[in-house]
Image: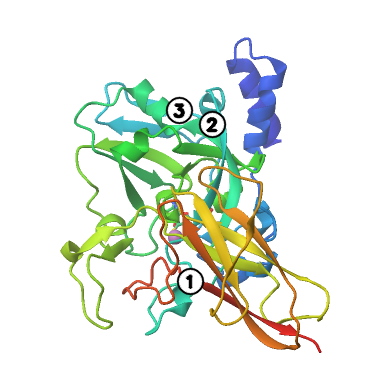
Amino acid sequence: MLRRAFLETLLRTGSGVAATSLFPAAAALAQQIVSKDRLIIRSPRPEDLETPAHLLTSWITPNELFYVRSHFYTPSIDPSMWRLRVEGEVDKPLDLSVEDLRSLASITQVVTLECAGNGRAFFDPPVAGVQWEKGAVGTAAWTGVRLVDLLSRAGVRPSARYVWFDGADLGIGRAPDFIRSLPIDKALNRDTLLAYDMNGETLPVSHGFPLRAVVPGWEGAYSVKWLTHIQVSAQDHDGPFVQAAYRYPRRPATPGSAIPPSETVPLRNLPVKSLITTPATNAVVSRGAPVRISGFAWAGEAAIRRVDVSTDNGRTWAAAQLGRDQSRYAWRQFEYLWRPTEGGSYVVLSRATDSRGLTQPIVPEWNPAGYVWNAIDQVRVNVGT
Ligand SMILES: Nc1nc2c(c(=O)[nH]1)N[C@H]1C(S)=C(S)[C@@H](COP(=O)(O)O)O[C@H]1N2
Ligand SMILES: [Mo]
């Protein structure tokens, strides 16, 4: 009933709207709630769901398997009421509906998203926060508008230095609102987008319906979901999600010691990292047949140059083959065929190197919030005799 009324309103107000242009509007109305029943529940509400690493087998992660990280309760948004406002250091503030956005030039980009806290559970000594293991990462084809197109339309003033993103979710109790601040260069970069579709479907509710930012190559918290407000500013935002969280110590930190914010820098680009997804950890394989070792490697804005695999505890390494699927900010699949000659239990290791020559550490640097764990990955594989 509601849907019908919505379509009729569109028909009445959309003077001369072609019949086909109604389809995106109808799609925008159908909020996607995808089943996430194969994910690990780190928190049911707020929703923090991790993908078991062995389910990450395809270059594009299906929406049902894509991890979810939400600090607060998922807002339910009526798309017919929803607006995106762009204001602040601009000549002409904007106020846009879902249909307005869908009528603008669109782009689709395959981008890997990873939470800064992915791997937090592996830090020693342990740190507080969602205890993500390996699967707070995924890759999707995001469709939407370039942020720079909206900013040009609004006329960004020379005073602009940051762009603040605010979504419709609200802090729980006294917790402050989740607001993130993006430096103007990255905001004006042609690859930064505002997405309304994910893998060809309307953005699912958990992933930010009806609109989210996608900031390619940077840690996931820049990609603000349920976006309602973009404030162009001459200053950085002073809220805790900019000034306290998502920051990294300037110098290696002593576990247990407090680090003042002035001794930290904001996290931005993701570091080089790899993840073995096949075989699953503790898998039993048979001797004789080659064992396919496969996974993904990514390095934020940089490209993956190589991935090496070791099956002898890191004594020797062999180059894995890199997959054909490529996109600037997307992970790269790797594959290595291993022929174990003797039965027993092995630890298989993977180590990625990026186009800057940076490679994964054996021991990542400890930091108080447990961000950007990127140690050489390892999976135990048992070879039958
Ligand atoms: N509005 C809003 N946007 C948000 C968040 C949030 O809590 N609220 N979480 C951020 C974090 S920390 C990450 S890692 C990504 C996760 O995106 P996903 O849930 O689609 O995987 O969304 C980001 N965008
Ligand atoms: Mo995150």
Give the Cα distance between marks 3 and 1: 38 Å
Q: Residues within 10 Å of mark 1 (few under 14, many from 20)?
A: many
For this rendering, which residue is in front, 264 or 342?
342
Q: Are marks 3 and 2 in contact (CB under 8 Å)?
A: no
What amino acid is labelled 1 in the image?
Answer: Gly
For this rendering, which residue is in front, 119 or 246?
119
Q: Does residue 181 sit above or below 114 in this rendering?
A: above
Give the Cα distance between marks 3 and 2: 7 Å
Q: Quadrant of the C terminus?
A: bottom right
What amino acid is labelled 3 in the image?
Answer: Leu
**SS at circle 1:** loop
Q: Position of residue 22 (x, y in %)?
A: 67, 24
For this rendering, which residue is in front, 139 or 105?
139
Q: Does residue 43 sit above or below 300 in this rendering?
A: below
Tag of residue 206? none
Q: Nearer the viewer, mark 1 or mark 2?
A: 1
Q: Does residue 220 sit above or below 231 in this rendering?
A: below
Query: Which residue is identified by label 3?
Result: 96
Query: Which residue is identified by label 2?
Result: 98
Q: Does residue 237 sit above or below 357 in this rendering?
A: above
Would you say 229 lies left or right of 91 here?
Answer: right
Q: Could one spot residue 240 in this view of the protein?
A: yes
**SS at circle 3:** strand
Query: Which residue is identified by label 1?
Result: 119
Give the Cα distance between marks 1 and 2: 36 Å
Mark earlier in primary sequence (1, 2):
2
Q: Position of residue 20 (x, y in %)?
A: 71, 20
What amino acid is labelled 2 in the image?
Answer: Val
User: Residue at left 35%, top 53%?
Assistant: 268
For this rendering, which residue is in front, 379 or 162?
379
User: Residue at left 46%, top 55%?
Assistant: 354
